[in-house]
Amino acid sequence: MSKFHPDVDVLTEYVAGNLSYHETLMVAVHLHYCPECRKSAHELEALGGVLLDDLPGEPVDDRLLEETMALLTSEGPIKRTPKPYTGYQNPEVPRPLQKAIPNGFDSLNWRKLLPHLQVCDLETSPDGPTITLHRIKPGGRIPKHTHRGTEYTVLLKGGFSDAFGDYNTGDYLCRDASHEHTPVAADNEECICLTAVEAPLRMTSWKWRWLNPFLS
């Protein structure tokens, strides 16, 4: 079970539909793994419904009601043919990512960034954050770095640790410029993470600072 979760303010904004696309995706992926946060989200939705019910109603002109009813009934009942489900069931891939990863993690076009690290960009936009998968070999170490902007991470497989804690499948993390860390994957299994980065990382280890111009 997940130990690291989005806070209640983030869940509230998620339920209200006020988060950006990448924040919504990260929370949705976490909810796939976390029954505790799914329960909280359902409770927030129910609370929102109660609050809406308590709002005073607005008077509606009788003519508007008649026009609306006439429009609804003018063409007869609407018939919908259910579309066959063409998805797949892959236990490794969370439901919100199944469309982006239709054939599992191994089928993706991974590129080698470091000897123990592969990456795969799921979505890159000049006007938005980069959404990327990181695949770290068992025991692999990511060089010490900090963040020029906010970085969201959800673990999809395996686990890693850093100076702030130990993380496992389903955990949701939010890092910024105040966090400097050296993630190390667990020894017994590869680690796959989904990240959304609002600005490039900044390597702080002297050995890897030469990478910074290539990350901007």
Image: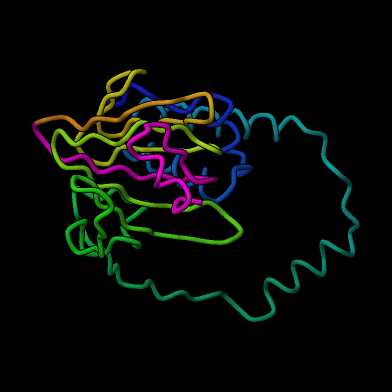
Occupied quadrant, residue 116: top left
Left or right: residue 187 versus residue 197 is left
Occupied quadrant, residue 84: bottom left
* 20 lies above or below 63: above
Observer-nearest of 142 and 38: 142
First to last magenta residue range: 188-216
Observer-nearest of 206 and 127: 206
Observer-nearest of 96 and 156: 156
User: Which x, y percent locates residue 216?
Assistant: 51, 51
What residue is drawn where x is 54% and y is 45%?
Answer: 198
* 166 lies above or below 38: above
Q: Is residue 208 visible?
A: yes
Quadrant of the snapshot with the N terminus: top left
* Residue located farthest toward the left when viewing the structure as drawn: 188
* Residue located farthest toward the top when viewing the structure as drawn: 164
What residue is drawn where x is 43% and y is 52%?
Answer: 131
User: Which x, y percent locates residue 39?
Assistant: 42, 28
What residue is drawn where x is 25% and y is 60%?
Answer: 110
Left or right: residue 30 versus residue 40 is left
Q: Is residue 38 visible?
A: no
